Amino acid sequence: MTPTVALGMTLHNQARHLREAIDSLLAQSDPDFGLLLLDDGSADETPALMAEYAARDPRIRIARHDTRQGMVATWSEAAELALRQFPSARYFAWASDHDRWHPDWLRRTRAELDAHANAVLAYPQTRRIDGQGAVWAKQPKTFDTADLRDVRARWRRFAGEAAGAGDLVYGVMRADALRRAGIFRPVLQPDRLLMLELTLQGEFRQVPDELWFRRQSPSASVVRQRTSLFTPDTVPAGLWLPARLQHARALWRTYVRTARPEVTPAVMRRLICQYVLLDLWREYSKSTALLHRLDNGREAAQRVGKSLRRTVWTAWYEGGMAFTAWRGRMRRRGRQLVYDLAVFRRRVRAALYEASMTAARWPGLLRRALKRGVHHTLVLTHRLGLRGRS
C-alpha cells in the first residue's frame, strides 16, 4: 500500500464518538490515504474498536500506549508513526477521535496543495457541533495567507489576526514542511507555535466550504492544557510562563541560535518581537471597552489615578475603622478578663474561708456529739434499770 496522504488519529476515552469519526474518514471520496490510530492509554472500549476497524480495512494501522503519555508526545508520535508506516505519503493530517468530516474533505484540501506549490497547508471552513452532533449557530472563521509570498507578511497576518490554530492544525499539510517545523514542541498551545513555523515555509489556503465538523468540548481551555499536554514526569521547564513567551523562547533557540534556510537570525529576531507584541495586542484588543479607554490616554490615566486614590483612601479608612474596632474589642476583652479573674479570686477565697470554718467547727461538733451520746446512754441504762437501783 503506497498512499499519498497519511492520517494520524490520536485517541483517548472517546469510544462513544469513535465510530462516527472513523466512518466519516473511511467514506472519503478520495480513498488514497492510510490511517494510523494511536491510543493514548484509553480505559474505555477504544482498543477493541481500533482492532475491529484494523481487521476490517487494510488502510488502517494501530498502536497503543499502555499508560497515558500526554497530548504533545502522542501527537508527535502519531505523525512520526504515520509517516513511517506510509513512507510514500507526501501529505499528512491529524485527525481527532470525536469529530466528523465531509466526504469531500480530503479531495478538496489535497487539490489545493496539488494546485499551489507555495502552499504548505490547506484546510476547510469549520462548523462547531455539540455532543449530540447538532451544528452550532456560530459561523465559521475565515483565514488564509494565500498569495502572500513574503514571509514577513504571512507572519504578520497570522500573528496579528484571530486565526484559529486549533482549526488550522487539523488541515492537510506537506509532510516535509511538518518535519522541518519540528512537529509539536513542548510548550503550551503547541498548535499555534507549529502554525507560526509553517508560515515561514509557505502559504495557508482555506477551502471556502464547510467540510469539517468539530465537536466542541466544554472543558477545552489553555488552563486545562497544563495537565493534558504533559504527564507529571514530562512537564517541561518554564511551563508557568505565558504561552507567547514559551513560543518566543522556542523560536529563538531554533531560528536565532542556529542558521536555518527559512529566515536569517536577524530577521527572526524582529519577527519574534513582532509576534509577542501583536499577540499582546490581539489579546487585549478583544475588549472594546479597553479600546475606548485607549482612545484617550489622559482620560484613562486620570480615571486610573482617581480609582487608585479612592482605593487607597478607602483602604486607609476601612483599615483605621477596623483597627479601632479591634482595639475596642481587645480593651473590652481585657477588662472582662480582669473582672473574671477578680471574681474567681473572690470565689476561691470564699471557698477557702468556708473550708477553714468548717474545719474549725469539726472538733466542737465532735465533742458535743460524744457528750450527747454519753448522756443518752446514761439515760437509757437508767430507764432500763441497768443503773441506779439496788
Image: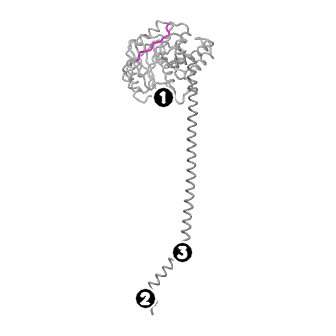
Name the chief secondary structure element in magenta: loop
**The label number, if any, that marks residue 385 in the structure image:** 2
Name the image quarter holding the N terminus.
top left
Which residue is denoted by mark 1 in the rendering? 68
Relative to 115, residue 333 above or below: below
Tag 1–tag 2 contact (CB < 8 Å): no
Amino acid type, mark 2: Gly
Percent coordinates x, y for residue 227 in the rendering: 50, 28
Q: How many marks?
A: 3
Secondary structure of the residue carrying tag 3 is helix
Tag 3–tag 2 contact (CB < 8 Å): no
Q: Which residues are magenta?
A: 138-146
Name the image quarter holding the C terminus.
bottom left
**The label number, if any, that marks residue 364 in the structure image:** 3
Query: Mark 1 or mark 3, which is nearer the start of the sequence?
Result: 1
Task: Give the distance between the C-alpha atoms of the residues marked 1 and 2, in whole angstroms.
Answer: 111 Å
Q: Nearer the viewer, residue 97 or 311?
A: 311
Percent coordinates x, y for residue 158 in the rendering: 52, 13
The crowd level at tag 1 (other Cα within 10 Å; few <14, some 14-19, many 20+) is some
Amino acid type, mark 3: Gly
Q: Indicate the colouring scheme.
A: one colour
Percent coordinates x, y for residue 186 in the rendering: 54, 23
Residue 357 part of the magenta-drawn span: no
